[in-house]
Amino acid sequence: MRDLALCLFLFFLTNCVTSVPTKEEFESCLSTISENPSNITNHKSDSRIYTASPESPSPDSSFLNLNFTSLKPILTLKPESESEIKKSILCSKKLGVQVRTLSGGHDYEGLSYLSLSPFMIINLVNLRTININLTEETAWIQSGATLGELYYEIAKTSKIHAFAAGTCPSVGVGGHFSGGGLGAMMRKHGLASDNVVDASLMDVNGRILDRSTMGEDVFWALRGGGAASFGVVLSWKVKLARVPEKVTCFISQHPMGTSMNKLVHRWQYIGAEIDENLFVRAIISNNQNGGQRRVKTTFQALFLGGVDRLIPLMNQTFPELGLRARDCSEMSWIESTMFFNWKSGQPLETMLNRDLRYEDLYYKAKSDFVQKPVPENVFEEVTKMFLEKETPLMILEPLGGKINEISESDSPYPHRRGNLYNIQYMVKWRVNEVEEMNKHVRWMRMLYDYMTPYVSASPRRAYLNYRDLDLGSNTGTNTSFEDARIWGEKYYRGNFKKLGLVKGKIDPTNFFRNEQSIPPLF
Ligand SMILES: Cc1cc2nc3c(=O)[nH]c(=O)nc-3n(C[C@H](O)[C@H](O)[C@H](O)COP(=O)(O)OP(=O)(O)OC[C@H]3O[C@@H](n4cnc5c(N)ncnc54)[C@H](O)[C@@H]3O)c2cc1C
Ligand SMILES: *[C@@H]1O[C@H](CO)[C@@H](O)[C@H](O)[C@H]1NC(C)=O
Ligand SMILES: *[C@@H]1O[C@H](CO)[C@@H](O)[C@H](O)[C@H]1NC(C)=O
Ligand SMILES: *[C@@H]1O[C@H](CO)[C@@H](O)[C@H](O)[C@H]1NC(C)=O
Ligand SMILES: *[C@@H]1O[C@H](CO)[C@@H](O)[C@H](O)[C@H]1NC(C)=O
Ligand SMILES: *[C@@H]1O[C@H](CO)[C@@H](O)[C@H](O)[C@H]1NC(C)=O
């Protein structure tokens, strides 16, 4: 995100933006635009319109961006009804303003709340109702809900149901479901997007479409293609997963050194192969203890079963870890979601917290997919690089299981059979300065370059929900589909073309666009 901010900053130094509609013009449009009155409910938009003040970050952005006021929205609307979203879209079209839809605001490059062009934000925070149907084992979830709100609601309703999605509770459903959704149950139940069975989409004309009226190709595109290219997804219908009343979690920590390298090396052979009820991820991070910097690897695991079955399973498949029953805890599934957030023992209500309690506000992230085990010495080199940094992070998440049973073209998310694990790289920093940003971003690119020989290639794969503008971005309003292939095929591989065709059908004028939206193909 800092990268985008920098590049936009340079853009604004050298360009003059003219005739940007004012907030007042936009509000006047909202109050006059004609619409069937029966659709308008609870109209009290004033309390929901915020103007960005030049000094402070826009109040709705969770990740504070650098102090570049030019990137602020003309206004942020927090609609309470679908008709208000429709009016926002129609007025934005009329006034030549871009729309950025914000659900949880976790986009790694800030594309839900930053833009080069004049724009407004539709913040879905007030549209977050969750309706669970236990008979059907489904739920309808409005896009503004967070994963934590969804997990909490499911746990309140049933002890044996759950949903397979990401581990961070403040992530929004809107961005997460539409970009895939990797989580601790994916080896058993697939990605979040694999479990979407219907959706409600508002298109560029303000029409509300469901799966049957949008057509199977548009519905396909929403399940991993990134919804921002196609419209505003109002809500999602998902299939719930069944879980045992007791699951088991453990954490196993290992300081840097030969035995840590051997463990991570060995883990690569079993992570994607073991019983699909078992998810063991490896987190490489730094410890800053008493002035001395140390690297460590933390194995963090969820087993959909009891400890009595887990111990023999681990003894058989990963004996090097030396797991014992007393290292494990049995708990309910909802408690396991807290465990994965280092929140064990806290009230379940902390899952409802929408704020991002990040100590370090600035970061740069990247992703990779690994297809054959990386040599042991690579982890030694990574340790050396980590020692140069205060807060570097690499999260290795095992794939396999259910993910492999789904074909690459079944949804836009293509990273299936043949991929052992996903890597998420991250570096964080505290000082809000361009020089500081450059230093950390350079380091991140160096680590990424170092990993090149060991990860997927031609093209090097990337995960959409770990958005990275280094991969390439649209320039101006009219990037051709051909030019976008450079980054598009990294996220979507062979599915990119179909995404372009769907875009050409549902939004032919390319109204819904951002730095990495899909250009229309006809
Ligand atoms: C702390 C943290 C932890 C994370 N953990 C995981 C994890 O465990 N697994 C994983 O897979 N990912 C994880 N992610 C990544 C996360 O899945 C993505 O950033 C996701 O896109 C965030 O969704 P959001 O709604 O919060 O973001 P937003 O910033 O609101 O949206 C992201 C993108 O989707 C668009 N969008 C949002 N809502 C809609 C809508 N209703 N209709 C149309 N377009 C929409 C936005 O315009 C933007 O382009 C994590 C991210 C963070 C910051
Ligand atoms: C608005 O209401 C009319 C009549 O009730 C209906 O036909 C139309 O589909 C509604 N539009 C939206 C966007 O809900
Ligand atoms: C942000 O910019 C404003 C206006 O230029 C300035 O007054 C303020 O000090 C800046 N804040 C930071 C944290 O740099
Ligand atoms: C739940 O789904 C069943 C089966 O489709 C349906 O008959 C029932 O009306 C639904 N319940 C609610 C509360 O919507
Ligand atoms: C692990 O397996 C070995 C034999 O494969 C057995 O001797 C040992 O007791 C087992 N340990 C545990 C903790 O199950
Ligand atoms: C966009 O590009 C296409 C083909 O490259 C061209 O035909 C079209 O006129 C361009 N549109 C605008 C608005 O520049």
Image: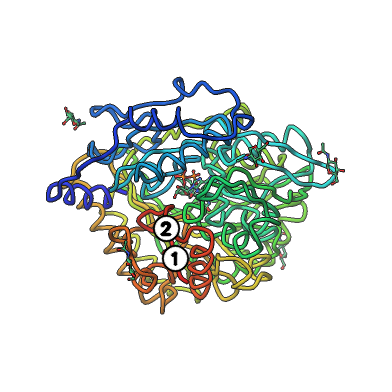
Front-lying residue, 100 or 148: 100
Q: Residue 49's mark?
A: none
Check the image and report above or below for 420 versus 514: below
Disc 2, ligand 6: is the CB inside 8 Å?
A: no
Q: How is the image coloured?
A: rainbow
Mark 1 — residue?
520
Q: Are marks 2 and 1 in contact (CB under 8 Å)?
A: yes
Identity of the residue drawn at 62% across and 59% down: 219
Q: Position of residue 69 (x, y in %)?
A: 23, 36
Q: How many marks?
A: 2
- Of residues 285 and 449, the one nearer the viewer is 449
Picture residue at 33% right of the left edge, 38% below the top: 361
> Which residue is farthest bottom?
458
The image shows residue 459 at horizontal and vertical percentages of: 41, 76
Task: Evaluate whether residue 62 shows in this view.
Answer: yes
**Residue 381 seen:** no
In three-dimensional space, the C-alpha distance between marks 2 and 1, rounded to whole angstroms, equals 7 Å
Give the residue drawn at x 62%, y 57%.
191
| Three-letter amino acid code of the residue under disc 1 | Pro
Q: Position of residue 462 (x, y in %)?
A: 44, 65
| Quarter-of-image position of residue 24 | top left
| Residue that carries the numbered disc 2 in the rendered image | 510
First in sequence, mark 2 or 1: give its number.
Answer: 2
Q: Quadrant of ligand 2?
A: top right
* Dot 2 amino acid type: Asn
Looking at this view, is 140 or 163 the one in front?
A: 140
Judge left or right: residue 204 versus residue 55.
right
Mark 2: few/some/many CA within 10 Å (<14, 14-19, 20+): some
Q: Please, is residue 379 above or below residue 222 in the view?
A: below
- Regarding mark 2 in the picture, which secondary structure is present there? loop
* Residue at the limit of the structure toward the left, as seen here: 14
Foreground pick, 395 / 465: 465
